[in-house]
Image: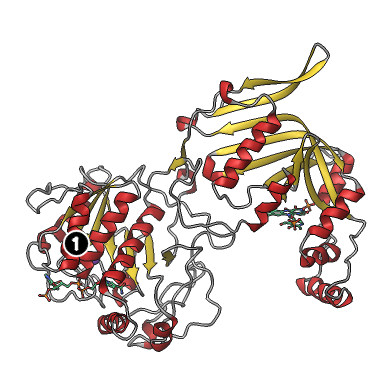
Amino acid sequence: MRGVLGKSRKMICSLLSQAPVSPAYYYRSSPSIYKPKPSNRFSWGFLAPIPSPAIRVFCSKPGEVGGLMASSVQNQGSISYLTQREAAEVDETLMGPLGFSVDQLMELAGLSVATSINEVYKPSEYNRVLAICGPGNNGGDGLVAARHLYHFGYKPFVCYPKRTQKPLYSGLVTQLESLSIPFLSVDELPMDLSKDFDILVDAMFGFSFHGAPRPPFDDLIKKLINLHYYEQAQRKPPVIVSVDIPSGWHVEEGDVGGDGIKPDMLVSLTAPKLCAKKFSGPHHFLGGRFVPPAIAEKYKLQLPQYPGISMCVRIGKPPQIDISSLRENYISPEFLEEQVEADPLDQFRKWFDDAMAANLKEPNAMALSTTGKDGKPSSRMVLLKGVDKDGFVWFTNYESQKARQLSENPHAALLFYWDGLNRQVRVEGSVEKVSDEESEQYFHSRPRGSQLGAIVSKQSTVVPGCHVLHQQYKELEEKYSKESLIPKPKYWGGYRLKPERFEFWQGQPSRLHDRLEYSPQETDGKRVWKIVRLAP
Ligand SMILES: NC(=O)C1=CN([C@@H]2O[C@H](COP(=O)(O)OP(=O)(O)OC[C@H]3O[C@@H](n4cnc5c(N)ncnc54)[C@H](OP(=O)(O)O)[C@@H]3O)[C@@H](O)[C@H]2O)[C@H](O)CC1
Ligand SMILES: Cc1cc2nc3c(=O)[nH]c(=O)nc-3n(C[C@H](O)[C@H](O)[C@H](O)COP(=O)(O)O)c2cc1C
Ligand SMILES: Cc1ncc(COP(=O)(O)O)c(C=O)c1O
Ligand SMILES: [K+]
């Protein structure tokens, strides 16, 4: 097992997919709430900071660029907005000298739209999607998005009243028909779209829109505007997701009369167009993870970094969330007494393997809770570095706060939470230091930087500033040249918790979770684990 756990360090996991990952990646539904994706430790799935200051050249009026508010978490002032002409020019450059085909770009655009939708609106809650597609490429993006959404587990419908007779478009239609995705004519659409659909994809017009919408799109746009009235009538309206431009909006000026559609989500493509500054809905995403540096340089495009391997990135402020409404409904396979291992260590290994297979980030991260002689508890995360019949091992500083508490009270609790699997494991028991030899061995297996870090850090003591740590680190780096052995400080080593109680928790709907507890029992002078079910 030790060997297996060692692998977790390498697991900079793929963070895009919210889709089920084998063997077990269970569902959680969260109605109407944006759940930040666990994409990386710092960003909550939003933008990583852009290292250089905003360049802001590609827009017509300098003051118009980077209009995101200062409070916007990590991307303030850092994104370029395009005029209508510029947007068309970028597309032409992509499809001219840079060798892209329209099919390719449309595929990437539609995929970005589908992944953005999936980031916020999970198919368990928002299943029925109507893609309303216009006559141009924006409509094509909608057709592609509908196909991807089907494969992501949604039920798409398509309204495509003005079909373009080009092989690209008829191919997209054939692909959708082959998936038995229904095409609805404008007449077949209900007056009130709110009853039959959870998501309306507005793919009518993109950056080539001009003038006032002509039939039948004028009425379709009105249907989207009118949803607002159903909202007032207490019915939960479907959400509107606009592709690139909210249809009917002026590409640069936005919703000029203030009476246009008000999308809940806008997915800008390549780079947001000027009208996107007027978007005040909760979810603004950018799709276009294909812009070659040549284009970005040529047009001085300032674009955000995409997290992990994602096709989309949230831009703009994350929505204000009412914390009290944040909740998940856990949906998982049954976890029954008959299925569990008699030995909790075997059960732990099984679940740990599932967590590894599900590509969870640092499945060996566990909260360690301790109390000192004052009885006041404190918790912090540590990394599990080994587990066997003797117990659960982690390494730390023997002069830290936790070490002081453990010397006063050698009992502790460990907690694992495996988000993607709706699982939690609690382990409680007594704690002792591991042998010096074991600590030595593990210390020297760590990256040299972490070894030096452990020497530098008088963990849990007050430091006057980070420069002190960096200075000491630098000195040690010079002292211990590349090959030389870095001695383990005597104040650094491992602890082992010998379990006296386990609890395996599997989230279930309506808060009726499975909780199986293992506690030791003497039977005929033999120690066995008794398993009981606890009320959730
Ligand atoms: N770089 C990318 O990420 C890509 C994005 N793409 C998407 O393409 C659109 C731009 O596509 P384009 O085909 O140039 O234009 P539109 O889809 O916006 O629409 C053009 C058609 O709409 C008609 N139109 C225009 N105004 C009106 C109106 N007032 N009423 C009715 N119809 C209107 C227009 O007809 P005309 O006769 O007026 O010319 C066209 O038929 C971009 O926004 C992205 O969504 C691509 O997928 C590729 C790369
Ligand atoms: C994911 C994660 C893993 C961590 N792993 C360890 C670890 O293995 N050992 C350790 O000493 N500190 C680790 N830390 C830092 C501790 O949480 C904590 O800040 C530090 O040990 C000081 O705790 P104390 O003052 O309560 O002793 C980790 C932090 C995080 C977020
Ligand atoms: C202070 C500290 N010590 C130790 C560790 C565990 O690191 P390693 O896996 O290198 O042993 C961590 C991990 O975050 C840490 O922050
Ligand atoms: K649109």
- Vertical position of residue 90 compared to residue 304: above or below: below
Secondary structure category for the residue under label 1 = helix
Q: Could one spot residue 416 in this view of the protein?
A: yes
Residue 51: quarter of image: bottom right
Judged left or right of residue 115, residue 416 is right
Examine the rendering and report whether any part of residue 240 can be seen.
no
Q: Residues within 10 Å of mark 1 (few under 14, many from 20)?
A: few
Give the residue number, with chain letter if any, for mark 1.
171
How far across and how far down the image is residue 75, in percent? 48, 72
Q: State which quarter of the image contains the C terminus.
A: top right
Q: Please state, as top left, top right, bottom left or bottom right, where the N terminus lies in the image.
A: top right
- On the image, the x and y values in percent for residue 254 come to 25, 73
Residue 306 lies, in percent from the top left, at: 47, 68
Residue at figure coordinates x 45%, y 45% from the top left: 20
447 vs 73, nearest the viewer: 447
Location of residue 80 in the rendering, given as x and y in whole percent from the top left corner:
39, 79
